[in-house]
Amino acid sequence: MEFTGTQLMFIIFSAIIVIFSILTVTSRRILRAAIYLLFVLISTAGIYFMLNYQFLAAVQLGLYAGGIIVLIIFSILLTSHISQKFEKVEWKKSVFSAIAVIAGIIVTLTAVLNYQFEANNAITQEVDMNLIGTKLLSYDRGGYVLPFEVISILLLASMIGAIVIAKKGKKV
Amino acid sequence: MNFNIYDFTSFNQWIDNYLYTSLSPFWALIVEMTIIGLVFLTGYALVGLFLVYLERKVCALMQNRIGPNRVGPFGLFQTIADLIKLLLKELISIKQADKLLFNLAPFIVIIASFLCIAAIPFAKGLHAMDFNIGVFYVMAVSSMGVVGILIAGWSSNNKYSLIGAMRSGAQIVSYELSVGLSLITMVVLAGSMQFSTIVEAQSDGWFIFKGHISSVIAFIIFMIASTAETNRGPFDLAEAESELTAGFHTEYSGIKFAFFFLAEYMNMFIVAAIAATVFWGGWMPLHIGGLDGFNHVMDFIPPFVWFFGKTFVIIFLMMWFKWTFPRLRIDQLLTLEWKYLLPINLLNVLLMALMVLMGWHF
């Protein structure tokens, strides 16, 4: 079977995602788990790049890899020591979670395999940034201005919450 | 084959055609990727070494000294000798450290800066990836370098390293906002995030002149914030040698230390290259709209000379900062960002939007 470059890249990316996802949940050192998660997120961004959806790929890198992972690592740095390790999980618990995982895999696989995928020969297009920007702020049909505003209110609320928590109490 | 130092497009086209006619598409792609990787790696190492030399010379100039002058003409081979010394040094491994993360950290830092280079246009046609979200891509990728610094500090199992990493984390996360917002100001003026479009749009005047007031404010903020983001003095709290020995890379030796060192210098180069591209026109010669004779004379200087000239002027500025200003305290650093730069920056974006809407720019 002749591989094309895209197929090979897809195989590499998905292998990285699968392997490091498993390592993320099985690692007993917390910072290593965070770094494995970083690899999973970066490979996901790689798949987006492969699909030519560069905007989403850059958002994935900037927000998840550069934002959320940094936040997670920061909180680990503040709270945990290098010698700390999680205890080994009891065998009963691991059997139970293995059953849950296998059940999940069966459900997903049957759903995916039963779906009739049709090959699409259309050329992949780059998504225009202007289009994303206009849609995000448009109030016509198919515009996203309401969710955009709702999310910004949520963000404002969480920022105020953070400030209230961080603010020192009145001086005695 | 037609090689032309003013436009590399046809030269690259020729290589591409040659590879695709002589090899199967799969192998042609692999060979192309390998060539680009090798060219970038070589360029990365050479520019990095040259920057270390330049830093020592500029530092000497500021302090009224001569600087390196023994190895080779004008001491030019000094950094190569230093590199060989670093390669031969022992890699000390630490018993109580998390070995995997300790060894991984330099690579994360260096890969993050390497990814940025791919999107920078060096000359007409000399451009590895022309994303339509170029500016945004660079911002996203450069934010990953801090992960390497944080895990380097933590996995060394050393107080100084940890404090250095925490400081640098707080610093980079805060100053990233200002870098992003000042670039967004220029994206508003350009109307595009693609680097090739941004450079083309400056063919009748650089953006720093076209957007006058707002552009100048954005440029100053970008210079301050990006000096902070590359962990350079006066913002080098992460490795403040008088307080923290060497900060996050205290425990690193030999070539692993050299990786951090090289990445720091290359980050400075990348930041300067982006400033040159977005504010000073990248490889576009100095053109003034309307003066055709003058523009034509300027066109005789090849684009890559313009690009590297501008980049090194900005690098000189950043070195000048480092050897002139005293180091800030951590609270002064955060006050500067959150109380001054960020509000000014937000207002500046609004001002630029107003200018573009009213047509006040050139």
Image (cartoon, rainbow, N blue to C red):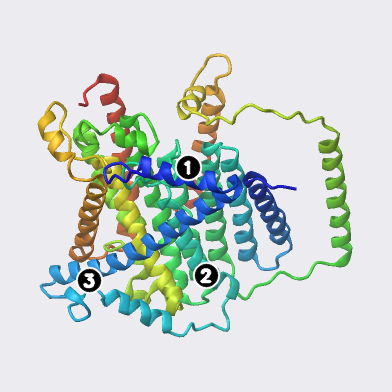
Residue B76 visible in rendering? yes
Q: Indicate the amino acid at tag 3.
A: Arg
Q: CA distance from mark 3 to mark 2?
A: 30 Å
Q: CA distance from mark 1 to mark 3?
A: 44 Å
Chain letter for mark 1, please.
B
Chain letter for mark 3, please.
B
Q: Earlier in the sequence, mark 2 or mark 1?
A: 1
Residue A110: x and y, percent?
A: 87, 39
Q: Earlier in the sequence, mark 1 or mark 3?
A: 1
Residue occupied by mark 3: B56
Query: Circle 1: is it few (<14), some (14-19), or many (20+) Cα within 10 Å?
Result: few
The image's mark for residue B17 is: 1
Q: Give the mark toward the camera: 2 or 1.
A: 1
Chain letter for mark 2, please.
B
Q: CA distance from mark 2 to mark 1?
A: 49 Å
Q: Quadrant of residue B168?
A: bottom left
Indicate the secondary structure of the residue bearing disc 3: helix
Residue A139: x and y, percent?
A: 52, 17
Quick check: marks 2 and 1 in contact, CB under 8 Å? no
